[in-house]
Amino acid sequence: MRFFLLSGHYRSPINFSRDLMEQAKNGLARMRNAKSNLKHLIGAGAAGITEEEENKFKALEAYRDKFVTAMEDDLNTADAISAVFELIKDINTDVKDGASKEFAQKCLDLLTELTDVLGILQDKEDAGDGVDEELQKLIDERQAARKAKDFKRADEIRDMLKAQGIILEDTPQGIKITRI
């Protein structure tokens, strides 16, 4: 709801149509996916930022100026969110598998800086990025069950975690954990 309200210009009338609410939901999901992908790349990335990545990041920092300009323009949150989406588009283009951890971290920090101003993307996922011991045991047990081709048990564990608000996604780089 917050994202929906921030997406519209403050002088525009509010229209709570199903389509607009769905668009807001999809926009927020796109932002969450970008944040999640960056976190994953931080864990799987190479060490040491390259000169090319430094140059790309300097170009990405221009979106901070665009964001600030929009917010200084009578708190134009619609334009500020537009700057965030442009940033995400370029991050998705520039930060790929094989990117350095430092580059992915800088991009995540910039994205977080901008979204925190608007109070979006602050969810359960941010409350604790670490994996507690009990959760890690379940993940390890699920991996062992998958390796032993005991898919019934692996699915049971996956469903138990999902009931707790934890989604596991198997990727070529390893398990990606998302808290919902």
Image (cartoon, rainbow, N blue to C red):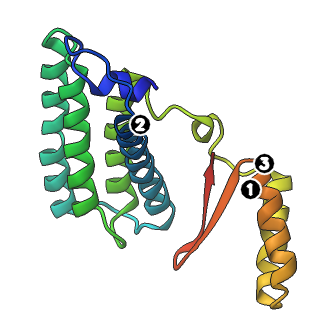
Alpha carbons under labels 3 and 1: distance apart: 5 Å
Quarter of the image where the C terminus is located: top right
Which of the labelled discs sits on residue 18, or is there none? 2
Alpha carbons under labels 3 and 2: distance apart: 29 Å
Q: Identify the residue at image location x=49%, y=60%.
A: 40
Q: Under tag 3, what secondary structure? A: loop
What crowding class fits label 3: few (fewer than 14 Cα within 10 Å), some (14-19), or many (20 or more)?
Answer: few
Q: Is residue 174 left or right of residue 149?
A: left
Label 1 or label 2, whichever comes before in sequence order: 2
Task: Find residue 133 and report its horizontal and vertical position in percent.
Answer: 83, 53
| Camera-side mark, 1 or 2 | 2
Please identify the quarter of the rendering in which residue 125 is found.
top right
Indicate whether 164 appears above or below 61. below
Q: Identify the residue at image location x=14%, y=28%.
A: 65
- Furthest residue to the bottom? 149
Q: Identify the residue at image location x=41%, y=55%.
A: 38
Q: Is residue 32 left or right of residue 146?
A: left
Q: Amino acid at mark 2?
A: Arg
Contact, mark 1 vs mark 2 (Cβ under 8 Å) = no
Q: Identify the residue at image location x=18%, y=45%.
A: 60
Task: Find residue 120 and report its horizontal and vertical position in percent.
Answer: 43, 29
Q: Amino acid at mark 3?
A: Gln
Q: Amino acid at mark 1?
A: Lys
Provide the residue designation for mark 3: 164
Indicate whether 122 appears above or below 101. above
Which of the labelled discs sits on residue 162, or is there none? 1
Label 3 or label 2, whichever comes before in sequence order: 2
Contact, mark 3 vs mark 1 (Cβ under 8 Å) = yes
Please identify the quarter of the rendering in which residue 110 is found.
top left
